[in-house]
Amino acid sequence: MKLIDRHNFFGTVCEVYTILSLFKVIFEAIVQDVFGNYQENLLVMFLLSFAAVFVLSQYYRFLEYPLLLCIAVQYVVLIAFVMLITWIFGQFQPLHEDACKDMFWSFTVPYGIGVVIYYISLFREVKRANESLKKIKESGGHNE
């Protein structure tokens, strides 16, 4: 296990919270025989978060394509997944007539904000790495 410090504190909190929340939902479903909208919503949010992070993590595979095209394709894949999940749930229970529209906006807005934050952070990190490489090359690669 890695040391928790100011750089990974929030990420560690998020990981622990996620694990505990999933455990709670599974525990309630198994032991208390309770599985309602609350538990379903938590699991769907986890599933969509997992899918979004996975798709974003595959960006490095598409570096030869324009960034906007990559972002658009990632979004289309994810929104298709969201609509598929919504349709599947609709096969087992009645959905509100605006369920697809609601899922579209409920996913699109946070995903759009997340994508902006992710790519700004990514490009800042790449810029810092390039500056470090430039300094190393300028110094001839020798430690002084």
Image: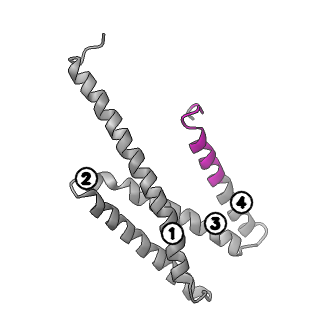
* Stretch in magenta: 3-19
Amino acid type shown at disc 3 = Leu
The alpha-carbon separation of the residues under discs 2 and 1 comes to: 25 Å
Amino acid type shown at disc 2 = Leu
- Give the residue at mark 2: 63
* Residue 2 percent coordinates (x, y): 55, 33
Foreground residue among 118 and 36 = 118
Foreground residue among 134 and 17 = 134
Q: Is residue 118 left or right of residue 63?
A: right
Q: Nearer the viewer, mark 2 or mark 1?
A: 1
- Give the residue at mark 3: 42
The alpha-carbon separation of the residues under discs 2 and 3 comes to: 33 Å
Foreground residue among 120 and 17 = 120
CB atoms of marks 4 and 1 within 8 Å: no
**Residue 4 falls inside the magenta stretch:** yes
* Residue 128 percent coordinates (x, y): 35, 34
Crowding at mark 3 (Cα within 10 Å: few <14, some 14-19, many 20+): some
The alpha-carbon separation of the residues under discs 4 and 3 comes to: 10 Å
Q: Nearer the viewer, mark 4 or mark 1?
A: 1
The alpha-carbon separation of the residues under discs 3 and 1 comes to: 14 Å
* Residue 119 percent coordinates (x, y): 39, 51
CB atoms of marks 2 and 1 within 8 Å: no
> Residue at 45% of width from left, 62% of height from top?
112
Amino acid type shown at disc 4 = Lys
Amino acid type shown at disc 1 = Phe
Q: Nearer the viewer, mark 4 or mark 3?
A: 3
- Give the residue at mark 1: 107
Q: Nearer the viewer, mark 2 or mark 4?
A: 2
